[in-house]
Amino acid sequence: LNRTVAIKTLTEGFAGDEDMVSRFSREASLLASLNHPHIATVYNHESLDGQYYLVMEFVEGEGLDQLLDRSRLSIKESLQLGRQIASALESAHNHGVIHRDLKPANIRVTGSFTVKVLDFGLAKQVRLVDPGSGSSVPDAIQTATGQILGTPAYMSPEQARGRNLDKRTDLWSFGCILFEMLTGETPFYAEKPLQVLFKHCTEEVPALKEMNPDIDVPPPVEQLVS
């Protein structure tokens, strides 16, 4: 159709897993049915020589992660972007789609300060430990051997524990992103990814002013993030 598109290929070896291929086809079809101004449109899913890929809307602009690295957002700007992300989440959740890997790198911001959320429903659920095994969080972390699928800085406690996920996992990730937009810092930091996961599971979320004493956040916003 003579338009610019984005093509996202899936990992090598994917074609040999029938369950994964079936799930991909279902989820890609569901994503293609979503129609929302803040969700990148999926046009089609295809395969060629055993390689599966998505044909998607090409979104101009930069990743939210790049924007946060480059500049500090004002409270007004943070809430403007936050409302758009929340609207995208609400629409997807109402259609039964959970993102499962919501993070700044999966959020594009255009020149007109419009948000487009990418990759809904395509992140594989994290399994660090069998939830029926009775293992504690430290045990899970010690035995995880680095098999983390997702981004620890934005990962909900239930995802870190390998439990079944629902839309609340996205709300946690969204809270972490909103926290970072307002303060310039993620809620939990550690040198190693598994230490970050442990903090998500065991520590209270710090107050916004604790992370950045210079910001003056209205109490309702502080309450929302908390």
Image (cartoon, rainbow, N blue to C red):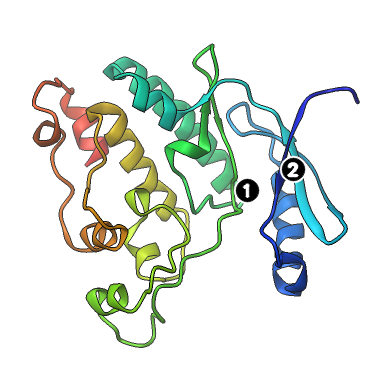
Q: Is 118 above or below relative to 66?
A: below
111 with respect to 104 (left or right) = right
Under mark 2, the amino acid is Ser
Name the outermost residue toward the bottom.
133
Numbered disc 2: secondary structure:
helix
The residue positioned 46% from the left and 45% from the top of the image is 102
The residue positioned 62% from the left and 21% from the top of the image is 60
Q: Is 177 above or below relative to 205?
A: above
Q: Which residue is mark 2?
A: 33
Residue 6 at x, y = what percent? 72, 34
185 with respect to 103 (left or right) = left
> Is 93 in front, or is 161?
161
Q: Residues within 10 Å of mark 2 (few under 14, many from 20)?
A: few
Q: Which residue is mark 1?
A: 95
Q: Quadrant of residue 61?
A: top right
Residue 158 at x, y = what percent? 36, 65
Please say if the residues under marks 1 and 2 sit with CB atoms less than 8 Å apart. yes
> Is 147 in front, or is 220?
147
* Quadrant holding the C terminus: top left
Q: Residues under labels 1 and 2: Cα distance?
A: 9 Å
Under mark 1, the amino acid is His
